[in-house]
Amino acid sequence: MSRAIPVRPKDRVCFQCSQCAECCRNIEGELMLTPLDAYWLARLLREQRLASSIDAVYERYAHTDLLEGCLPIYLMNTVGDDHACVFLRDGRCSVYKGRPQTCRIYPFFTCPGECGKAFETFQCMDRHASHFTGGKVLVKDWLHENFSEESCAFMTTEATLMPELGGLLRRLGADEIKACMVQTLHYRYYSYDLDGPFMPQYTRNMKALMRLLRNRSKEV
Ligand code: SF4
Ligand code: SF4
């Protein structure tokens, strides 16, 4: 795992993007696609007439994996010898307006603090250290531009639900996890109307998924 150092909103960090696209290469197995990322991508690709539903994003541009052996997730596909993101074309992001949250906020990342504390922000000290030699970025401004209220609401809800979701899945055991895989993917990732707002649909889906898993865990 790459090293990261905590930063505060008032910090000014040396950073200048030279648009080398190196952060979009060698990302095999590294870029997780959340349901919100897939929703944004699907809406953009629909505008570009490249996809008509969220299903197409997963089918064409992502593949599944199991997080900590129990939670099915989607990871972005890569192409070529340099394992570049499937959306990198001629050295540019072809889905810039709809790119995933991780890409938007890079070279920082943010996550909810423990026990409902405020979000914490970190600077990624990864293999692309050379971009930390140029201009200056005020962390607060970067977050304002690249971390939307929708992302904040999504990550806050995820942080609240994940401990119980993980616990329920672990209690089910490997065979039951496999049996619930399709429903877990369906509720978490697929069941979205692109014309409706994301958060109410996500909340509804996660409630349905948790209900289903609670019932299954009572049976095992
Ligand atoms: S963020 Fe860094 S690695 Fe990514 S394109 Fe800019 S300079 Fe290159
Ligand atoms: S979605 Fe765009 S910014 Fe993100 S890794 Fe792919 S090409 Fe790079």
Image: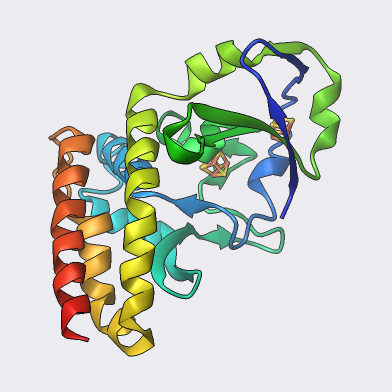
Which residue extends farthest front? 115
User: 77 or 6: which is nearer to us?
Assistant: 6
Q: In this view, does 182 lie above or below 52?
A: below
Quick check: 88 above or below 6? below
Specify the quarter for ligand 1: top right
Residue in view at x 14 percent, y 62 percent: 211
Asked if 61 appears above or below 22 in the picture, the reply is below
Residue at 49% over, 16% down: 145
Image spot of residue 220 (x, y percent): 22, 86
Task: Say which quarter of the image contains residue 18.
Answer: top right
- The mark total stands at 0
Between residue 92 and residue 151, name the one nearer to us: 151
- In percent of width and height, residue 25 lies at 68, 50
Residue at 51% of width from left, 47% of height from top?
87
x, y percent for residue 70:
41, 73
Q: Is residue 100 visible?
A: no
State left or right for residue 187 relative to residue 144: left
**What colouring does the structure picture have?**
rainbow
